[in-house]
Amino acid sequence: MKLKKKDIRSLTKEQLRNFFVENGDKAFRGNQVFEWLWSKSLHTFEAMTNISIETRQMLEENFVINHIEVDSMQRSKDGTIKNGIRLHDGFIVESVLIPTEKRTTACVSSQVGCSLDCRFCATSRLKRMRNLNPDEIYDQVVAIDKQSKLYHNRKLSNIVFMGMGEPLMNYNNVIKSIDKITSPEGLGMSSKRITVSTSGVPKIIKKMADDEVKFNLAVSLHSAIDSVRTSIMPFNETFPLKELGDALVYWFEKTQRVVTYEYIVWDGINDKKEDIKALINFCKLIPCKVNLIEYNPIDDGEFQQANSRVIDNYISNLEMHDIVVNVRRSRGKDIDAACGQLANKS
């Protein structure tokens, strides 16, 4: 029976070095291959030109490089680019390049589908098929960096884990991908330019604090009243606001880093005075800032953006309590690339 080849990017540098020693070659050959795979992001052994043909053939016989392909690309009138990313096993996820005047941001996916059940998000309607591997997350960043250079004449500046999936439900692989993205042997990006957005998994938020991660944390909050939050994000019943709040206090005590709350205001759902008051009280737990996000409909009309008067009411009340608040206008709506719209319609 033919043995299945191992994905070479699942090996550490040390394991690669050992492989070459065990096969009668020098350990440094592993360093060379590691550099081709990560900092140069090569997807074929054939292109590893400083390695002998015989060695490349040996790699070909023993390993595969399971890389992604940009299967489809849509460009919005505002410059946003949405990619349909085909994985080695045929599954497709989506990633987005978001350009502004000062930066270009990669919005990357961490799961095929999603583990959670937020009723306002298109991705949650797809069941979770599997977690993405660290190299599949890494490849999305590499692809978007190329697009940023090609279409906007500048390198990628920021990364947000806000694509398909709940990053904290794929914690180990997300952390490994960030380690590669920030490593001088990978893309060498600063952790300060990376934000991981979660719907709120208290146990993992505490683990991140214990692991002393250096990236930024954003929480998809949308209500600070348990009954309201559970009605729109049913998993809140398992991870209620008290547990989430305790985890965030623990995060701040350990890291001293401000948390961003992402918050959409919907007509008839969280647009009352008590909703604003509850958010203000939740914000008092730790230093934070609030991003009020424009809602992007997902066809059925159940959720509607609250009117501008309500948004203004949120802003004035938050500012009155010295809470930093920003209004985030969505980009890429015309190609279903905006927040909450990623669902592989193609």
Image (tube, helix red, strand yellow):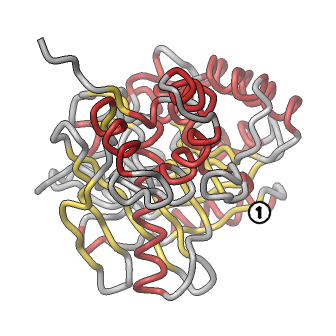
Nearest to the observer: residue 330 or residue 309: 330
Tell me the quarter of the image containing the N terminus: top left
- Relative height, residue 288 to residue 332 (above, below): above
What residue does disc 1 label?
Answer: 319
Residue at position x 56%, y 71% in the image: 156
Residue at 76% x, 48% y is 288
Query: In the displayed structure, would residue 130 be above or below residue 35?
Result: above
Residue 290: % across, % down: 66, 55
Q: Is residue 305 left or right of residue 291?
A: left
Q: Is residue 171 visible?
A: no
Quarter of the picture containing the C terminus is: bottom left
Q: Position of residue 235 (x, y in %)?
A: 42, 22
Identify which amino acid the numbered label 1 is placed on: Glu
Q: Secondary structure at mark 1?
A: helix
Tell me what residue is drawn at x 32 percent, y 29 percent: 62
Question: Where's residue 32, x and y in %?
Answer: 57, 49
